[in-house]
Amino acid sequence: MKKDKFQFIELELKALGGKMILYRPVGTKELELIRESNYRIFPPRLADQPIFYPVLNEQYATEIASGWNVKYNEDHRGYVTKFEVDDQYCGQFEVHQVGGAHHKELWVPAEKLGEFNKHIIGEIHIIKEFPDK
């Protein structure tokens, strides 16, 4: 079986039970806003950020948090969050492959983030943290 088929099966399994597991790499500022919401919502996008893009796998989120966030954020820290969203609701958004086979993002228009947040099931969890190297 090809690697692509394994990835497809993995995504299908994650969606079982009406929940889609998503990941989001964040910096310290965004994490503080998530904490202020009691780990329930993601903060609104900035004016120059028209898309909210959680990613579909932990590997890709880890690459962004440990590479991009650590390198470019003022405090040189990055975090990976994990959360579940109603799978049926997520079906309206496009998945974009933006690089390698595992570089897949769910593209949520910024103006729909408030509604997206209402479909988060449970809390947003911090699963990895990367300090300055």
Image (tube, grey):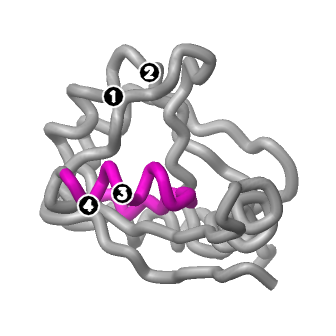
Proximity of marks 3 and 4: CB atoms separated by less than 8 Å: yes
Q: Which residues are magenta?
A: 20-36
The 10 Å Cα crowd at callout 1, few under 14, some 14 to 19, many 20 or more, is: some
The earlier-in-sequence mark between 4 and 2 is 4
Q: Amino acid at mark 4?
A: Arg
The mark that comes first in sequence, 4 or 1, is 4
Instruction: Sort mark 3 into few (<14), some (14-19) or many (20+) by Cα contacts within 10 Å.
Output: some
- Residue 29 place in picture, x, y as percent: 48, 52
Query: On the image, numbered disc 1 is attached to which residue?
Result: 113
Which one is nearer the viewer's eye here, 57 or 92? 57
Q: Quadrant of residue 69?
A: bottom right
Type of amino acid at the residue the image marks with label 3: Glu
The image shows residue 20 at horizontal and vertical percentages of 34, 58
Helix, strand or loop under label 3 = helix
Using the numbered discs, state the Cα–Cα distance from disc 2 to disc 1 in whole angstroms.
Answer: 5 Å
**42, 120: nearer the viewer:** 42
Q: Please tell me whether residue 32 belongs to the stretch shown in magenta.
A: yes
Q: Nearer the viewer, mark 4 or mark 2?
A: 4
Give the labeled residue for mark 3: 32
- Indicate the position of residue 100 as horizontal and vertical percent values: 86, 57
Quadrant in the rendering for residue 56: bottom right
Q: Is residue 116 above or below residue 12?
A: above
